[in-house]
Amino acid sequence: MQSYTKGILLFLLCMTLLSCKKGDEEMATIADNNAIISYTVPKGLLYPEVPVDNLPTKNRIELGKMLFFDPILSRDSSVSCSSCHLPDKFFADNLIVSVGVDGRTGTRNAPSLINVAYQPNMFWDGGNPNLEQQVLGPIDNHDELDFDANLIVEKLKKHTKYPLLFLKAYNTEPSVFAFTRAIACYERSLIQANSRYDDYIQNGNKSALTDSELRGETLFFSEEGECFHCHQGALFTDFSFRNNGLYEQYADSGRARITQNLSDIGKFKVPTLRNVEMTAPYMHDGSLNTLEDVVNHYNSGGVAHPNKSPIILRLNLSSEQKTDLVNFLKSLTDK
Amino acid sequence: MKNLYIITIAIIASVAVSACKKNESDPAPIIPTQTLVLRMTPKIGADTLDFASTHITANNERYTLSSFRYYMSNISLIKNDGTEEALTGKVFLINPNTSDYSLGNVPAGTYNTIKFSVGLNNELNHGDPTKYPVSNPLAIQSPGIHWSWNSGYIFMMMEGTCDTTDTNVDVLTYGQYSHDLFYHIGTDALLKDVQVSNAPITILPGVNKVVQIHSNINQLFVGVDLKTENRSHTMGSMPLATKIANNIPSMFTIE
């Protein structure tokens, strides 16, 4: 039955193309757009790991992009992925916690999706293994899209455009497999590293950073500032789970919710610092409003917690040093 | 002396090889097989499960149900002599809309125990649910029975309402069943092995066999105070989830 439907759709696709004057050209375009392509990776970043069942093609990225911006994924067609991951806000939303269907709010701050291709696991607690399966997370969550993956498939099958796009991209009718892959394929393409800091470090443009930013950089990568122990490498994160001494009692147990280990209470994944200037507020719960607040938090050493990372200690930075650090962080904003 | 050893070993080896060959040429004994179907019947005490009535636990606590589903996997049959017939690859999502689950062809004989797991082994539990065809019980279900926030399946999902009021005190709310009741039991640690051996299963050649297995839902509430212990997503309430999961093996009896 499935292959029968597929056959009919293929037939319709052919008819559509034949009936078009430029049929041959369009067929050639579809074939071209089905060629496996490479994600564009800027200097300084490695090519990300891509699952073999979801290698990028233009058709797949295009379909994923369309789905990403389509509220068809939410129960009442009111919210899309892009409602909380806004392109003009570096694919975050500048809210403390995001707003889902019926105006419901969650408990965690929406992260930027720039360079999400490099995440070894998903969510603040790492509870989901990869971008493809992550797509199910917000659909299931009652405070986000609050819908049902199979019902989404039913809607996609009845849609005027999607069946053809799925056929082109994944050679199948709309399915949970294909729509989760398409969205992941698009999200993986959001690779970016063209900040002033990149200009400085990759192109050797010594005038790209101000004196204050350079002092901030030195402090960031020194034992005095300690930042680099967790925020390291080209993405400014080691992807570890750490308790940074935010609370004595955590309302959200973080990594412990996944592992059930008491020693993981209050641990959250170290976030990237790229574009951090533009993705306020900060911390897993959006509780710190500004970069100055964040620097002050780390300068204070945070509050006592048995799981607090031992490298988070009072720093005694001067106000000039704090300004330098904040300025350096602002040099990590992409153009 | 050394040569004698070699000759001896060579003789033993050739005898062993020829013995093997002889065994291989013997036709394997043909054991007749027959279709075996499990008829899974959820019960509450003596009553058949239904989603319209109100139910009472052994502690006289009142509840209703709207959902009761669980994964059954790792199924095997054990004979009196201890030999085990593993029915590999069979995974069922037991749900009230389906009563019969076919195990396919099983060698005829008398089995004194049926063994299975409620839940899924580590490999299945953490597989990608989007990769299964829609008809597979491990595919994404509606309503869902998979956690995407802590990737893994819900092994047993029970949902309904309960009456947490005290008969003599809360006159107004008594009998309202206004409190959610849900147990979503999962995680690798709570995979439960079940052995049911209260009656033998005899499979005769040429006769399709249906084995009826009761699951007594009230058994889940043993040692549970429904007034306070009525919600668990497993994570976040591990002690309650563990208590419920530990009650699973004693739910089952062969009719």
Image (tube, coloured by chain):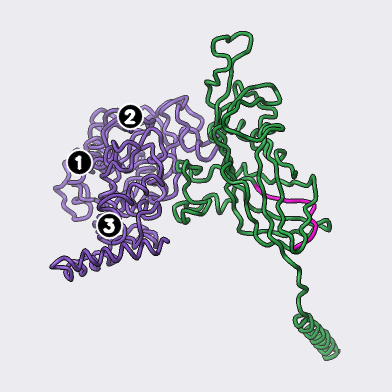
Dot 1 and dot 2 within a common chain: yes
Q: Nearer the viewer, mark 3 or mark 1?
A: 3
Above or below residue A235? Residue A29 is below
Q: Colour of chain A?
A: purple
The quarter of the picture where residue A247 lies is: top left
Is the residue A293 above or below the residue B128 in the image? Answer: above
Tell me what residue is drawn at x 35 percent, y 63 percent: A6
From the viewer's perspective, is residue A160 above or below residue B11?
Answer: above
- Location of residue A55 with respect to A137 vertically, above or below: below
Residue bearing mark 2? A102
Q: Residues within 10 Å of mark 3 (few under 14, many from 20)?
A: many
Foreground tag (1 vs 2): 2
Quarter-wise, where is residue A284 in the image? top left
Q: Three-letter amino acid code at disc 3?
A: Leu
Q: Nearer the viewer, residue A267 or B66?
A: B66
- In the image, is A136 to the left or to the right of B37? left
Residue beneath disc 1: A88
For disc 3, the marked residue is: A165
Disc 1 crowd rating (10 Å Cα; few below 14, some 14-19, many 20+) is few
Label 3 near label 2: C-beta < 8 Å?
A: no
Note the chain letter of the green one. Answer: B
Q: Is residue A328 found inside the magenta-colored segment of the image?
A: no
Mark 2 and mark 3: span between their CA atoms? Answer: 30 Å
Residue nearest the observer in this picture, A215 or B219: B219
